[in-house]
Image: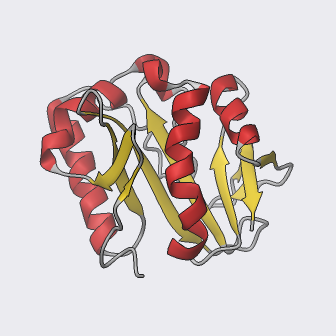
Amino acid sequence: MNVYESVPSIENEKFMLRQLCDEDKSDLLEVYGDEKASQFFNSDNCNGDDFRYTTAERMKQALDFWKTAYKNGWFVRLAIVDKTANKTIGTIEEFHREANDYFTNCGLLRLDLRSDCERTDVIKDILSLIVPISFDLFGCDKIATKAVSAASERINALNALGFSKSNNALLGHDGTEYYDYYVLNI
């Protein structure tokens, strides 16, 4: 299956991962306008974007860019929908990364959640949806995601799912070294 042609149905009893739509804007503004949540966002190698959006216009611009990125095959960013509340509580992004560092042939995953959802059980439930199929969807032999030391709930979820902290640097396109990545190998 080519994930850039169609996104498979990805859901469990609690959460659904689906393509982003314009109707997600107000819910996502709560995520990207959440100052407590922004400390956990991974903006490594994103050309200075810190993913802190505080206006509807800026959120719309981000949504438009994410849709363009999907159409161009740069990355897939999906809405994370809490099925009980029928509310979008964050996004998950993933792409196949080829590079001249340890993180080559890697599914690089970014998870952005509202701060009240930054809990081990929630993160584990969400990642359990995407991680097992990521190796096939993105044709990679490892999955990597960032978790800064302050993200204890996230780190607990990653450890429970079999991820290990890497001591390797992810090299940015400009040579910047980024750390705090957790990796799951096939």
**Residue extending farthest bottom:** 1
Determine the residue positioned at 59% across, 61% down. 132
Horizontally, is 151 left or right of 169 in the view?
left
The image position of residue 151, as x and y in percent, is 65, 26
Determine the residue positioned at 82% across, 50% down. 166
The image position of residue 105, as x and y in percent, is 67, 75
Q: Is residue 137 visible?
A: yes
Task: Report how many numbered discs are placed on residues in the image.
Answer: 0
Picture layout, residue 88 above or below residue 128:
above
The image position of residue 119, as x and y in percent, is 56, 24
Q: Dividing the image into 4 quarters, which one contains the N terminus?
A: bottom left
Picture layout, residue 62 above or below residue 65:
above
Quarter of the figure with residue 174: bottom right
Picture layout, residue 124 above or below residue 138:
above
Q: Dividing the image into 4 quarters, which one contains the C terminus?
A: bottom right
Picture layout, residue 143 above or below residue 1:
above
Quarter of the figure with residue 106: bottom right
- The residue closer to the viewer here, 182 or 185, is 185
- The residue closer to the viewer here, 26 or 68, is 26
Determine the residue positioned at 42% across, 65% down. 75
Determine the residue positioned at 22% across, 38% down. 58
